[in-house]
DNA sequence: TAGCCCTTTGCAACAAAGTTGCAAAGTTTT
DNA sequence: AAAACTTTGCAACTTTGTTGCAAAGGGCTA
């Protein structure tokens, strides 16, 4: 059976390379979101830093992963659901960051409420990040 | 009449220095949120980069400004309302980032809805950032 | 307002994060 | 299997953020 990573890459019209397979695989195996640093550490010396930057960029462009905003200056990436096409992200779910263990979850079943904006403002995207304690760290 | 900046600094138990006055003044005059880079550019050669970092850090700790999460790796800072005490931020309002002009607004009158989380998750803070087109850039 | 004490600033040096151009290696297509 | 194209790794560089320390500045008291 073909690996899931390969299928995903082909579906998004990307050539299948070692770097892309490994990085995508890492996302598939991780519960939460990953930062560039997470990936760099995990991969060890396997890949060049630059390659990781470029791979993540490509994945975002092609709609394989999406970014999660945060206030700590570390961009987090997480796998998109299937309805994300290239250039058109539809990640209208809530994200949760655990203050304790640092894991970032995509709460796929918690959707973002519609926000009523003041006159003149038009929304194109809404990002909602909740932080607190996750089910694993709960005392 | 005393400048507003000086009053604010004193209220937050900070000694009044030139750097702090100028940076706070810049916040008071700006409609939206500012990044470190904005301030560095605006201030020109006037202050050392390090001083700006430290001043922003101090302001956040003392509850004068708060950070706004974003996905583009540039922390934004905005003035807190009066009910933010040192170490206790109460910025439960929505933020809006204009895709066009880049301005970040604090929508003080739009409050963040309560989110129902899955079992085991406990929220301590909720950040909601809407992006789109602001009233100034509306065609 | 002079002098003491404590805080803040600027400098220098460093560490980390991100970018760019280009030649070599790898993929895809025919 | 070779041509055409894409991706990777390297090197060099820019930007962003951090730390320690001596000098300068602010606040308080007499």
Image: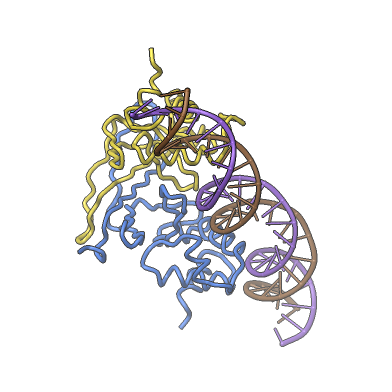
Chain colours: A yellow, B blue, C purple, D brown
Judged left or right of residue A131, residue A123 is: left
Where is residue A48 drawn, in percent x and y? 57, 37
Kindly give the residue lying farthest to the top in the view shown: A1
On the question of residue A122 being in view, the answer is yes
Look at the picture and state if B115 lies above or below B18.
above
Where is residue C17 drawn, in percent x and y? 55, 46
Viewer-nearest residue: A29 or A86: A86
Judged left or right of residue C27, residue A7 is: left
> For residue B137, what is the image quadrant?
bottom left
What residue do we see at 34% from left, 49% from top? B129
Where is residue D21 drawn, in percent x and y? 78, 60
**Image quadrant containing the C terminus of chain B:** bottom left
Look at the picture and state if D29 lies above or below A116.
below
Judged left or right of residue B118, residue A123 is: left
What residue do we see at 33% from left, 37% from top? A94
What residue do we see at 35% from left, 23% from top? A7
What residue do we see at 37% from left, 46% from top? B127
Viewer-nearest residue: D4 or A132: D4
Judged left or right of residue A129, residue B9 is: right
> For residue C3, what is the image quadrant?
bottom right
Where is residue B11 drawn, in percent x and y? 50, 67
On the question of residue A139 being in view, the answer is no
């Amino acid at each position: 059976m073909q690996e899931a990573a390969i299928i995903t890459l082909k579906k998004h019209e990307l050539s299948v390379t070692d770097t892309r397979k490994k990085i995508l695989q890492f996302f598939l195996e991780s519960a939460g979101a990953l930062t560039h640093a997470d990936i760099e550490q995990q991969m060890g010396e396997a890949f060049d830093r630059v390659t990781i930057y470029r791979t993540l960029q490509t994945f975002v462009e092609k709609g394989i992963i999406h970014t999660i905003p945060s206030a700590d200056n570390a961009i987090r990436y997480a796998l998109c659901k299937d309805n994300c096409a290239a250039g058109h992200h539809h990640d209208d779910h809530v994200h949760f960051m655990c203050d304790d263990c640092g894991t970032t979850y995509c709460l796929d079943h918690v959707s973002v409420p519609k926000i009523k904006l003041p006159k003149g403002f038009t929304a194109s995207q809404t990002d909602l990040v909740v932080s607190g304690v996750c089910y694993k760290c709960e005392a």
